[in-house]
Amino acid sequence: MIDPKMLLEFLLRRGSEEKARLFAYTIAPAVVLSVAAPGIWGGTFVLDVAPSLSVSELKTVMLEGGKLIQKSGLVIIVEPSASEYRIPLVTHSQQIWSSLDDGATRANHDRISLDAAGVYGKPPFLGVNVPVTLVVEGLPGKEIQIPGGTAKFDDLVLQSKRPIALVSGVLLACMFAFGMSSVTALPLVKGNKRRAG
């Protein structure tokens, strides 16, 4: 195990040029790798704050000819890593429409259910390693019941990932640019001082 005190002493004994090289070639890549590694090996990307359970409320049905009908519904997108949940419904629903095929639906009949209290799910679902989409007719409640408490419905509403991806990409590019510029700029400054002295 690395002793933090010894590591600090080691860093303090290095010159500014060596510190810059160490940062650019060791510390910065290690930070980038630690941020990206969970995504590579099946986890979630650390900068990605999207939850493993996402919901979206449906409000309108459009018929042929452009006629609109107000109708409440709910879309639930369940990642394979999501936790058990129950979504109470204010209005009772008779059916769930899912992205699972017949075999997967039968295998998971006890893991997805609909009753008077609402929609219940216990992922990960058997034989399924992709996100599952469920569509339920009815008005959802304000909270979602999860193990150990509740979560607000609005906190799990599906969000766009594009702004997060844009910011994380720029952040990683800036980190590498800073490290590389430190390594190339410091030797020039040191050389100019020697020539001037």
Image (cartoon, rainbow, N blue to C red):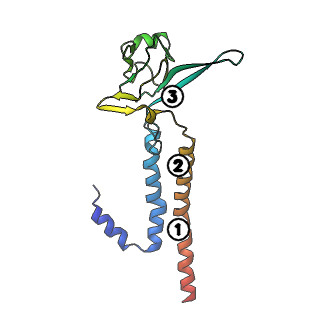
Q: Residue 114: x and y, percent?
A: 40, 14
Q: Residue 94: x and y, percent?
A: 46, 10
Label 3 or label 1, whichever lies nearer to me, is 3
Q: Quadrant of the C terminus?
A: bottom right
In the rendered image, which quarter is residue 80 located in?
top left
Residue marked by disc 1: 182
Which residue lies most toward the bottom here?
197
Few, some or many C-alpha atoms within 10 Å of disc 2 (few <14, some 14-19, many ≥20)?
A: some
Few, some or many C-alpha atoms within 10 Å of disc 1 (few <14, some 14-19, many ≥20)?
A: some
Front residue of 100/73: it is 73
Kind of residue indicated by mark 3? Ser
Front residue of 99/68: it is 68
Q: Which one is earlier in the sequence, the residue at label 1 or at label 2?
A: 2
Label 1 or label 2, whichever lies nearer to me, is 2
Is the residue under label 1 in contact with that under label 3 (CB below 8 Å)?
no
Q: Which one is earlier in the sequence, the residue at label 3 or at label 1?
A: 3
Q: Residue 15: x and y, percent?
A: 42, 74
Q: Which one is earlier in the sequence, the residue at label 2 or at label 3?
A: 3
Q: Secondary structure at mark 1?
A: helix
Label 2 or label 3, whichever lies nearer to me, is 3
* Mark 3 to mark 1 CA distance (whole Å): 46 Å
Residue drawn 37% across the image and 33% down it: 151
Is the residue under label 3 in contact with that under label 2 (CB below 8 Å)?
no
Kind of residue indicated by mark 2? Ser
Residue marked by disc 3: 56
* Mark 1 to mark 2 CA distance (whole Å): 21 Å
Q: Secondary structure at mark 2?
A: helix
Residue drawn 67% across the image and 17% down it: 67
Q: Secondary structure at mark 3?
A: strand
Residue marked by disc 2: 168
Which residue lies most toward the right here?
65
